[in-house]
Image (spheres, rainbow, N blue to C red):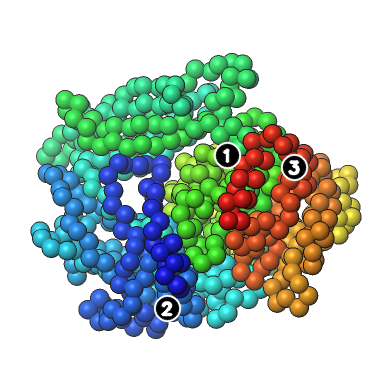
Amino acid sequence: MDDSTQNHFASNTWAYPRPELERAEWVCLNGMWEFAFDRTAELLRPDRVVWKSKILVPFSLETEASGIGDTTFCCAAWYRKHIDRPALKADQRVILHFGAVDYAAQVWLNGIEVARHQGGYTPFSIDITDELTEAGPQELVVRAEDDPADLEKPRGKQDWKLEPHSIWYPRTTGIWQTVWLEVVNKTRIRTIRWTSNLERWELGIEVQIAGPIPAGCRLSIVMRVRDHVLVEDSYSFLSGSVGAGSLAASELHRTIALSDPGIDDFRNDLLWSPSRPTIIDVQLKLLGDGGVVLDEVKSYTALRSIATQGDRFILNGRPWPLHLVLDQGYWEGSGQTAPGDEAFVKDIQLVKALGFNGVRMHQKIEDPRFLYWADHLGLLVWEEMPSAYRYTQRSVERVTREWIEVLKRDWNHPCIVAWIPFNESWGVPDLPDSAAQRHFVQAIYHLTKTLDPTRPVVGNDGWESVATDIIGIHDYDDDPEHIRKRYGIDEVEARLFELERPGGRLLRLGGDASVRQPIVLTEFGGISLRDEGDPTWGYSSCHTPEDLLARYSALLEVVRPLTALAGFCYTQFADTFQETNGLLYADRTAKLPWDSVAKATSGTRLSENDPSALLWRQRLMEMQR
């Protein structure tokens, strides 16, 4: 990497990593760390490591942005950084946070092991207060183990072969999301969970508290939409005697009733949707005896409902056509780690300007900062669990544990409107013949509905549905007439489920065929723009932008109006490594005239005065500079 490229990534200012529970004071630990390879995972203690290199965190070692750029096999990697001891007042604690470390992490502070975590897509936090020394720099060491050949762990699109092949891409090893410190009071807000009840015009809040809570403790809540105060209230904790001291219960559950304006025009102003993403900003204060502020955080929520009704997807009580695009979440030079918030904003604006109202995040649990911007800019998100590729007791345990962590991390985001625990039977390859594998999919489906009953769950997207709220179908037939005949006929469900096998697979395994469910074409298209002899690929190919536009328009002209479908998801948003079937190049520059793509996607052409058209034109000019 040349100096200018390295400086581009190193100079980024990182935003607060956990936007649903934000505190004012924090220390970002991204930047240069000492680094060492451990290719055979033999170095099990920090004192055995010889520090020979440096790496730019939070970019994985395979990426150019990291300064390493090594895509060969590596089973483990070591990181070291010396940090300053934060200034602490009485009863304050220091919490060390990791956004994501792929796959298994061990953490030492000043030679003492303080944590172990398994799961490459989910965060973990450690109270390191007791391991801090009184003076001098604090030595922080991280070991990340990520066996490239292990197919029993959730790994998504990370290739197990040396060179990327087919639809799999370079691996992501080690730290790949923000590392940060936070000084907090011993008594503090640990978690917040929001629920929305549109039928009753209510918002539910569940707060869990860490640390001892003095009698008389209460939670102050102020809710605002822009400058308008919706709610200003406080709630007391139930106090009781526990052990030797007087403590309050560590949980608070409350339902906050809002005034229903009654008229749709006024109701719509408060509801969240892609066309009007109204966010309710929340200020929470944990107050002790005499009004002393024990903790203060910012959060946000939204009022909206998601459901399925017969063969339709329902948003806020109304059918909402799903116009989604497949998003793999990779960037040139930085892999699965976005260069910064600006990259998330740009992608969301581009998706909307191309006529789509949402994305299916494919085989990746995206950074919370992406979900923050999807919430605020109005983008529907289907969230999909990265797959394991073997079915064993070990893979069952790993997938289940990490999926629960995913649900806990992300269930507050209004943009997420569907959960997808499995894709194309990956990790459960023998569903038609294995009752155990069918039970696993059914169990994860019901577990997801138990932990979050507010969203639909697509049990196994693509085919072989055994438990689902939406039938997702992957069909890469590149003949629009074949698509029309397959999905544009009367009694489409009976024909599909009994006769058709897109991808050579049955669409449904068991279940009540008489129950109508939404059908979404969740992968189709995949048209690659490439030259003759180009080794990149797509599900079909063409050689000129004009041909790509003609084929995309013809396909969307058939798919978009099909009444049998509740929506579609086109493959894909941007080129990803060797897979060149994006509507944009990998660097997000345009392959096609933006307004023509938007018209084909949504059925309407943006006018010259349309704000989205002006926004897209501005973004395109910026990217071409």
Q: Residue flagged by tag 1: what amino acid is it? A: Gly
- Using the image, tell me which numbered label, if any, was put on residue 607: none
How many marks on residues?
3
Residue 154 vertical position relative to residue 91 in the rendered view, above or below: below
Tell me if I can see residue 467 in this picture: no
Tell me if I can see residue 168 in this picture: yes
The quarter of the displayed image where residue 314 is located = top right
Mark 1: which secondary structure?
Answer: loop
How far apart are labels 1 and 2 at the CA level? 40 Å
Tell me residue 88's x, y (percent). 15, 48
Question: Which residue lies under the disc numbered 2?
Answer: 75
Asked if disc 1 and disc 2 are in contact, CB closer than 8 Å, the reply is: no
Q: If you read the primary sequence from the N terminus, does the residue marked by circle 2 or circle 3 appear first?
A: 2
Viewer-closest of 102 and 63: 63
Tell me residue 375's x, y (percent). 52, 40
Tell me residue 526's x, y (percent). 73, 61
Question: Which residue lies under the disc numbered 3?
Answer: 602
How far apart are labels 2 and 3 at the CA level? 46 Å
Badge 2: residue crowd in 10 Å (few <14, some 14–19, many ≥20): many
Asked if disc 3 and disc 1 are in contact, CB closer than 8 Å, the reply is: no
Question: Which residue lies under the disc numbered 1?
Answer: 378
Q: If you read the primary sequence from the N terminus, does the residue marked by circle 3 or circle 1 appear first?
A: 1
Q: Residue flagged by tag 3: what amino acid is it? A: Ser
Viewer-closest of 199 and 342: 342
Mark 2: which secondary structure?
Answer: loop
Q: Quadrant of the N terminus?
A: bottom left
Viewer-closest of 168 and 542: 542
Residue 135 vertical position relative to residue 182 in the rendered view, above or below: below
Tell me residue 614's x, y (percent). 64, 40
Name the residue at 28% across, 78% down.
51
Nearer the observer: mark 1 or 2; the answer is 1
